[in-house]
Amino acid sequence: MACCVVTVSHGLRVAIKTCWIIIVVASFYVLFLNSRHVNRPFISSLLDPADSAREWCPIPSPKLIGWTNISSLAMDVLRKNQQHQKSVIKIDRVRDGGKYEPAECQSRNRIAIVVPYRNRADHLAVFLRYMHPFLQRQQLSYIIIVVEQSDNGNSPFNRGMLMNIGFNEAQQLMEKFQCVIFHDVDLLPENDANPYTCPQDGRPRQMSFSIDYLNHYKPTARNHFGGVTALSTNDFRTLGGYSNAFWGWGGEDDELYNRVKSHNMTVTRAFDGQQPPSLFIPLTRYKSLSHRKAKPNPDRKRLLKQASTGYKADGGLATLVYKRLDWQLKPLYTHVLVDIHP
């Protein structure tokens, strides 16, 4: 689990690693403690009597392994996927629809992970094989929902609308989830010390602010709100969801950020305030799977400018209209195929 590269003696390396482990444990404790007064009573009301007898999952999870070489893993997954493309691949304890609940303890977090998707079969294969073990090591209760935009009409990709649809569908599949994580299919967290826990109300979390292709992991600007983003269900409803007006690449995440600020919410990042930052930024790094860059939305700047003046191009969740073409509980995810039009 390397946070930086230095030339030191063996004894000093051991001391640094020990110090790093202590800091990570303390940081996870702070993150969970901040949400404990919100999450624990909420979860208690959802559990069956048999579940309530189980102990709460420890802080931090004892199953964490640290950094993973995603490049090597991705190639291995793709090779196996091509060899066994006709077989059904399953992961231990993952129920149909991509649902998981730890058996050894009560999870402190119930999460819906929504993945907007179109024409990225290889990326989806890697994402699912990687993210299920990653999330399980954090002892989370979750469901993965993949919302696929059909090619009917050859409409431009609408990421914001697909995420609104995913949130809407998740309420029917896992009604009492505490938060939603909107996750691009081509971004993978490198270190399982990166917490996928639920943020507090009023404190949405921007997660993918350190990505390999952005100046080699240089943190993005504070107003960056795309890639991987976590919000409590209460906050997402309060914001009204994403705008449905952005067809093509870009803009929908900036518009949501403006909504967040206008509602006096605070955007957070994992390990905010922890010193020194150089120790913690490596824990939040993301690997991007190679892909062709999408064509930018030519109207995104105009729509953002209109939104900044108070003009609402749409009501987000309130005006969401789509046609569900297919709905399946697949071995590793819930698949929702939809038809949407400008």
Image (spheres, rainbow, N blue to C red):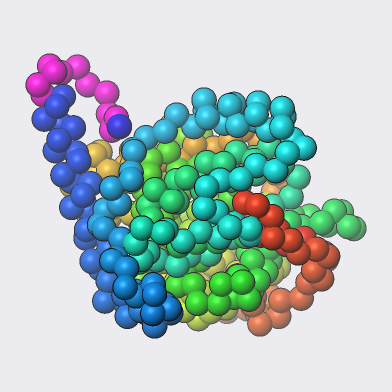
Is 228 positioned to the left or the right of 115 in the image?
A: left
Q: Position of residue 295 (x, y in %)?
A: 72, 45
Q: Residue 323 location, x and y as percent?
A: 82, 71
Per the rendered image, the range of residues in magenta is 2-12
Q: State which quadrant residue 74 falls in.
A: top right
Image quadrant containing the N terminus: top left
- What residue sits 65% from the left and 52% below the top? 331
Q: Could you tell me residue 328's position as x and y percent?
A: 74, 61
Q: Give the quadrant of residue 312.
A: bottom right
Question: Image quarter for residue 3?
Answer: top left
Residue drawn at (41%, 77%), measured in percent from left and top?
Answer: 47
**Magenta run includes residue 113:** no
Q: Main secondary structure of the magenta part?
A: loop
Which residue appears at 30% of the width and 51% of the height?
A: 61
Residue 10 falls within the magenta-colored stretch: yes
Among all residues in the image, which is located at the extreme front? 50
Between 7 and 142, the one nearer to me in the picture: 142
Q: Is residue 235 left or right of residue 90?
A: left
Residue 244 makes an appearance in the image: yes
Using the image, determine if residue 46 lies above or below residue 21: below
- Using residue 201 as the reference point, say whether residue 324 is left or right of it: right
- Return the residue found at the far right: 153
Asked whether residue 262 appears in the rendered view, the answer is no
From the top left corner, tell me how far across and down residue 20 is, in percent.
Answer: 19, 39
Compared with 107, 201 (above or below) is: below
